[in-house]
Each structure stands twice: as structure tokens, then as C-alpha cells.
Image (cartoon, coloured by chain):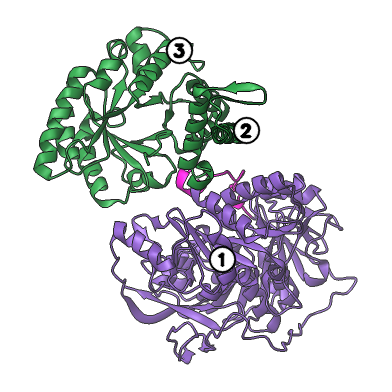
Chain colours: A purple, B green
Amino acid sequence: MKTILGRELPDYIEGYGEVTPFQGAFKDARIKTRVAVKLTSVNPSDQKVLANLEEAFDKLNLKDGMTISFHHHLRNGDHVLNMVVEGLAKRGLKDLTIAASSIFPIHEPLVAHIENGVVTGLVSNYISGPVAEAVSKGKLKKPALMQTHGGRSRAIESGDLHIDVAFLAAPTADTYGNINGVHGKAACGTLGYALSDAEFADQTVAITDNLVPFPACPIQVSQVFVDYVVQIDSIGDPAGIVSGTTKMTKDAVALIIAKRAAEVIKASGLVKDGMSFQTGAGGTSLAVAAELQEIMQREGVVGSFASGGITGPLVEMLEAGLFKTLFDVQCFDLEAIDSYRSNATHQAMSASMYGNPHTKGAVVNCLDIMILGATEIDTNFNVNVTTGSNGVIIGGSGGHSDTAAGAKLSIVVTNLIKARLPIIKDQVTTITTPGESIDVVVTERGIAVNPRRVDLIEKLRMTNLPLVTIEALKIMAEKITGIPKDVPTLEKIVAVVEYRDGSVIDVVRQIK
Amino acid sequence: MQKLRRSMLFMPGNNPGMLQDAAILGADSIILDLEDAVSLSEKDSARILVREAIKTIDYSQVEVVVRVNPLDTDYGALDVEVIARVKPDTLMIPKANEQEIKLVDQMLNQIEIEEGYVPGSIKLIALIETALGLENVYNVIQASKRVVGVLLGAEDLTSDLGIERTKEGQEIFYARNKVANACRALKVDSIDTPFTDTFDCEGLAKDTTKAKSLGLTGKSAINPRQIEIIHSVFAPTEAELKHALRVLDAMEEAKKEGKGVCSLDGKMIDAPIINRANCTVDQCIRLGLISGEDGAR
């Protein structure tokens, strides 16, 4: 069977199940059920604090084949996932599925557990580093399930992704299981990706290196969702958690792309009081924020909110009065953490509130302008951020598909040529985000608008911006790089790429 | 219409990534450098790289200038021989003197015949960076019809003079005047020396304003982020444009009324004022700030 984008998919994928092919960004709007949670109530005399992880393992109902979950707020500094999996492996457990909102290079020890059968399934929104390579090489028994940030919450809340035990890295936890991310040596700010896990898992364990007397203040994850609390020496390496200060790029080409993107935003007519904006933490994306900041200041515009993973530059815009509030699902740098800790208008949001399509309205639905990246774009504006051009998994949607679907104006900013490769192709290696959600592609050599956006094309024609068709952009790049050969893959499906609504938008096959 | 030469951006000739993107950085001209930016061990490879870049990459939006090595080195003549055959817009000749310009002119005559290019189509920019070259700048420009501009190289010049190069630039006051005047006299462009502190935007704006006030028509850049500042200094201000259009309107009005002279705001408008107004309007048309029709009203 085929998706609406023409990708051929099997009806059934071993280790995944029956396939519902992607039929369009909003084709799955119907009445949904939120799953009921089985819980063991805690009585007044019960103690939640356990001596160590081993005691927690003793108390938990551990069994082969279970699904355990982790959030990724400690990013490439996370110690918790490796420690827990190592402990479970020592106990002889096998056939585990790891549902981690993201997986980073620090999780390399997982590879050995994948190879020896302790871990046979992965569910994640973003996988990079050695684990991604292992999956791409077909080492994982079941196909990895790649979701979006909003899609993961949807899956958890609908019961599609049932979590047996959630292990929550907690920068601060009190003795009764209240958690926050703003205090402690591994402070990471908001905990947006931990909330659905805590709420919907059968059992939840807080793992902290900063145990404080009850009650912790503030409380970001409530005691009502937490079964046990375990104190360990270190949940993470601060150097890997935050990037310190997120710096503006000095790259001349990136700055040109950013300037043009800002001009597109301005020409769209969306720069006005009450506007909302989101951008990534990459160099070009942040440069767009800086350009937009200048335009907003010049024109005296006060926006409503900026959202997403929050960085210093967005904090600066909040403090300059350019936005009334921030919706922060995760803090990317120390400035964001400090701001969240001290400024009440810097608000946290859960991943579900951020992007879950099956709620009474996610924040992405309220978003005017979204700046996105891309590894590849095809001439139908479909975007790949899941695999590299060699077919190896290098990331995943994260919030890409969620925000693209929600925002009024989704702009992809990218160099037309990266490391000798043209970015625009007839077919992307993997479709992560459908072209129907992408409005504009801004490169250093020209700007292509999705033909669906006739209104935007008309507005941009009034400017001096270099408008071209996406096909013309493709030819421009290929004139310099030549046409790259297709990279052949094997038949075996190593990852299933789920759209935010749970339909399958593409699959990743094993590399040769 | 003659292309503007407000900004000329130096790009190292041995960096493929930079050569690939050189045309899109916003400069009026790019100077693909085979001289100072390239170490001795890379002279050959850079020459080949620049040759291939000119053949392959679409530089149609900018003037492509290649700075060759000095003619008294082992590389200069070979640079001219190899690069001219792929027809850059312009060659830049370092440490220029009459002799060098004449020599290159002859080489280009021959190459243009052999390659079937329009005779005289490859232009020259003389890099004035010695005391002798500076004193001789008028003759240097006259040494070939190909010379379309002069670039003042203050680092080498002050080194030749044995004086300190400063941010304030008082030491090159004479050189700037001399170059500006000779270029104006012979109707070629005069390009100021680069401002080397690439992080000091305010300093760059000041330095560029100073050069403009002395009559130089453009400025070289060593970093893409300098281009926008240079362009903003060389663009006429809105007030200047408004005034120029009023001057031309008043003149037209006087003509219609059969008056030989006219006045604006109580001041007499004479030939130099009209000339300046025409220059301002012409530049605004070239910058796309107004249409030709607006300027010709």
C-alpha cells in the first residue's frame, strides 16, 4: 500500500504491527480515547525513598519484554539511561523496549545491549550517534519506532505506547516524589518531555542526585505520579546537558540565509502585535531570531509568545519586551534555565501541550512563524531530518512535523549545498515532514515557495527577494555538485517513521 | 549601465567553499586572491582552483577580479597566462607601476586574440601600494585603456614608507587624496584600502565615511560582514536624493520658463550643483533606490 505521498509500505511490519499509511496532516481528526492508568495507591505510612537503584529494581514488577521510558532533558550528559539498562541487564532481563524521548551519543553502551538481546526495541523522537548507526545497520531486533515530540505524547496518552516503568532523571526530587529541573547540579530547566511518561506509566521512579526534604519548590512533576525516589551520585554531566551560552553564528552564508528568512517573514505580514514565533537552536535558526528581533524593535511590535526549546536569544527577546511569554518545553542553555527559574512569564509546557495532535489544541496550533532545518528537501517540499543522504539515521523529527503542521508560516532555512551535497532532490531519502506543512525554503541562492501558498507567492513578488521554483533551486545546486547517485539499501526495515497522528509516513531500510 | 564598484571583497583563492559562495555574499566585486592569501606551497593549486571556479560557478551577479602575484615573482606571469584564458572580468595587479601594467596589457592582447575574446575586454585594476607607485598613479592609470580603477593598499604602502599604520588613518591622508584625485581626473574608480578590524563595525563605518569624504568611490573588504556597512556609507542618503531631485526639478522649471539660471531655497543653482545632483540621481538609479523614470522626470 502507499502513503498519500507515494511511499510504498508493507501492510504489516514484523516487530511493529499493522501499518496505517499516512493520508495527510489532518486526516486523522476523529474522537480519541485517552487511556486509563492502572496505579497502586500510596498510603500514609508508605515510604517512597529507597536505598538505591537495586532496591527499586526489587520493588518494581520487572519482566522480560517490558517497556521502560526516559526523558532526554539531560541530553548528551545523561547518566540515567545507561545506568538503569546496565542494572537491568545484570539482572538477566531481556527483550526490553527503550522508550527514550531522544537518544544521544552518550548512550553508546546501549549498542552492546542491543547486540546481546537485552534491548530489542527502541521508541524515540530523535536518535543520533552510535545507537543510530547500530539501528541503521540492522542490529536491533525490531524496527526502531521514530515518533515526533507531540506524537510520542499522543502515543503514550492513547495507550499506543504503553510504558511499564518510567525512570525519570530528576535534577531535584523531594522525599515524596515531587520533582523539579531548576535546582541541583544537573539542573536542566523545564521537564516538558517527562510529564506524559510520569502520568501514564504503570510505575514511575524518580532518580535524583539532589534529594531535598518534602516539599520541593517549585514542583514540575507532582508526587501523585511518582512511586519511588532513588538517590544516586550523579544523574548527568552538566557540560553535556547545556551548551553554556548559545552563540550567534558568524558564518557569512548562514547570516545571508537568516536575513532573507527574516525578510520573508516581514513580507508575509505576520510581523505584528500578538505574533508568535519558534526557531531551533542551530546557528542559522538563531540568526533568524536576531534578524527578527531587529525588525520587531524597529517597528515597535510586541509579540504574544515564542515557544519550543528555549535559548538565550529568545530569553533576551522576552526580556526586551518583544514577547509577552515563552512556552518552554526544554531549556537549551544556562540563560534559559536561569530565566525559567526566575521569570514567571517564562512558562513551561509539556510535550503534549506543545505538539500532541489529539488534545483540545496544542501550542503549535497557535504558532504563526516556525523556522525549521532540513537534511534534504524534495521538489514536493517533503523534508527529511531523519536520515543522512547515505541512509544512516542522524536524528528524527523531534518537533519538526508538529510545528510545521501547526504554524501559519513554516520556513525551512538551509544551505543549498552542504558538504558537497545538494540539499534538494527529486525524492528525499526518508520523509519526516510532509510537503503540505512546508511553506517556504530559504537558501543562500534563492527562495522557493510551496505552490500551494499562492497568497504568499503574491506577497513575496512585491519584494526584491530572489524567488525561484524549487526545481530551479535543485538545478542550481546540481550544476555545482553534479547529481549524486542513489544509495542502495537492503530490504530489511530498521525503523518505522510515524507521523504525529500515529500513521506511518515512511520507513528506514538497512544500509549496505 | 556601468556596474557599481562600491565594495570589493577579498576571498582566498585556495578555499573551495569560499570560492563556491563568493558570488552570493552581496559584494559588488569579488577579488579571488592568488597573492597574499595563498602560501608559496599552494600557489599552483590555488591558480588551478580559481581557474576552475571561474569556469564552473555562476558569478554573473558580481564582477570577478583575480589578484595575480606580482609580475616580478615566479608566479605573476603564469597567473596572468592561466587565468586570462578563462576570462575573468578584471585582473588586479599588485605593486603596480607603468611597466607592469603595460606588460600585462600586451599579454592580454595576445591571449584575447588567441581565445577569440573581444580585444580589451579583460580590465585591470592597479593596486597602488608603494611610494613610487603612488607618486606615479596618474601614469599608471594611463598606461593601459584596460585600467578601470585603482585600489589603495595601505598596509604595504605604510610599510614601504616605514611608518605606523593606525586605525585613524591620518598617515594615509595624502595617499587617499592623491589616488582619489588621479582617478577622478581620468574617470576611473578609486577603491579604498580594507579596514582590518573585522569586528569593529563602527570603526569601519567611520573609516569608510572618511574615504568617501576624500573622494574615493569604493572600499575593499576582507570579511563579508563589512559589505553592508560599506554599501550603506556609499549609498546617497534619503535627504541627499530628495535634494538632488528638487535641484533637477527647479532646473527643468527654469528651462521651461526660458531662464538661464535658477535658484532653490534662495541659493543659486549652478553647473557644479546640477552635476552633483545628476551624479546622486544616477547612483540611486544604479542602486535600484529609484527607477530610471523617477530619475528622468
Left or right: where B1 falls relative to A186: left
Q: Tell me the amino acid under the disc marked 2.
A: Ala
Determine if marks 1 and 3 fall on one subunit: no
Left or right: where B65 falls relative to A237: left
Label at residue B239: 2
Label 2: which secondary element:
helix
Look at 17% across and 18% down and name the residue there: B99
Residue at which label 3 appears: B173
Residue A234 vs residue B236, the one in the foreground: B236
| Residue stretch rendered in magenta on the structure | A236-255
Q: Chain of mark 3?
A: B
- Decide: marks 2, 1 in contact (CB < 8 A)? no
Residue B273 vs residue A504, the one in the foreground: B273
Residue A116 at x, y percent in the picture: 45, 73
Label at residue A458: 1
Q: Tell me the amino acid under the disc marked 3.
A: Phe
Mark 2 or 3 closer to N-term? 3
Q: Nearer the viewer, mark 1 or mark 3?
A: 1
**What's the CA distance linking mark 2 and mark 1?**
32 Å
Question: Is A239 colored magenta in this rendering?
Answer: yes
Left or right: where A295 falls relative to B285: right
Look at 58% across and 51% down and name the residue there: A288
Quadrant in which the N terminus of chain A appears: bottom left
**What's the CA distance linking mark 2 and mark 3?**
28 Å
Q: Quadrant of residue B10?
A: top left
Look at 52% across and 68% down and name the residue there: A396
Q: Tell me the amino acid under the disc marked 1.
A: Glu
Residue B193 at x, y percent in the picture: 41, 23
Residue A181 at x, y percent in the picture: 73, 56
Residue B96 vs residue A459, the one in the foreground: A459
SS assignment for the magenta stretch, majority: loop
Q: Residue furthest front?
A: B258
